Image (cartoon, rainbow, N blue to C red):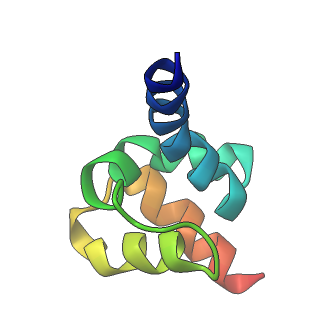
């Protein structure tokens, strides 16, 4: 039973981590990039956004756009 709960938490953690850092629009635009480049990044303190920014030119155009917009806020 404990293994099942732990597995569910681990599977849900990336989505939860991304949710804490980005808006719904940004999550949608950056979800694949997050999973590809930053899935091991500990959430909080802007670490996910920093990780996505480090990926730079490798990010999808949609994700780049929302990150640029987020930096302007």
Please state, as top left, top right, bottom left or bottom right, where the C terminus lies in the image.
Answer: bottom right
**Relative depth, front residue between 56 and 48:** 48
Q: Residue at x 70, y 58 (%)?
A: 20
Q: In this view, does 21 lie to the left or right of 56?
A: right
Q: In which quarter of the image is residue 69?
A: bottom right
**Relative depth, front residue between 40 and 27:** 40
**Relative depth, front residue between 66 and 39:** 39
Compared to residue 17, the image places residue 53 above or below, namely below
Residue 6, given in percent of the width and then of the height, sits at 49, 32
Q: Which residue lies furthest to the left in this view?
A: 58
Q: Is residue 38 left or right of residue 19?
A: left
Q: Residue at x 49, y 45 (%)?
A: 14
Q: Residue at x 46, y 56 (%)?
A: 63
Q: Residue at x 55, y 25 (%)?
A: 5
**Relative depth, front residue between 18 and 5:** 5
Q: How many labels does the image show?
A: 0
Q: Quadrant of residue 64?
A: bottom left
Residue 24, given in percent of the width and then of the height, sits at 72, 44
Compared to residue 19, the image places residue 72 above or below, namely below
Compared to residue 52, the image places residue 1 above or below, namely above
Residue 12, given in percent of the width and then of the height, sits at 54, 33
Residue 11, given in percent of the width and then of the height, sits at 45, 31
Q: Residue furthest right?
A: 73
């Amino acid at each position: 039973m404990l293994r099942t709960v732990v597995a569910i938490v681990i599977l849900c953690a990336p989505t939860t981590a991304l949710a804490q850092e980005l808006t719904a629009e940004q999550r949608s635009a950056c979800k694949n990039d997050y999973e590809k480049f930053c899935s091991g990044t500990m959430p909080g303190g802007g670490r996910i956004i920093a990780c996505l920014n480090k990926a730079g030119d490798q990010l999808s155009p949609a994700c780049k756009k929302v990150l640029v917009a987020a930096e302007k806020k």
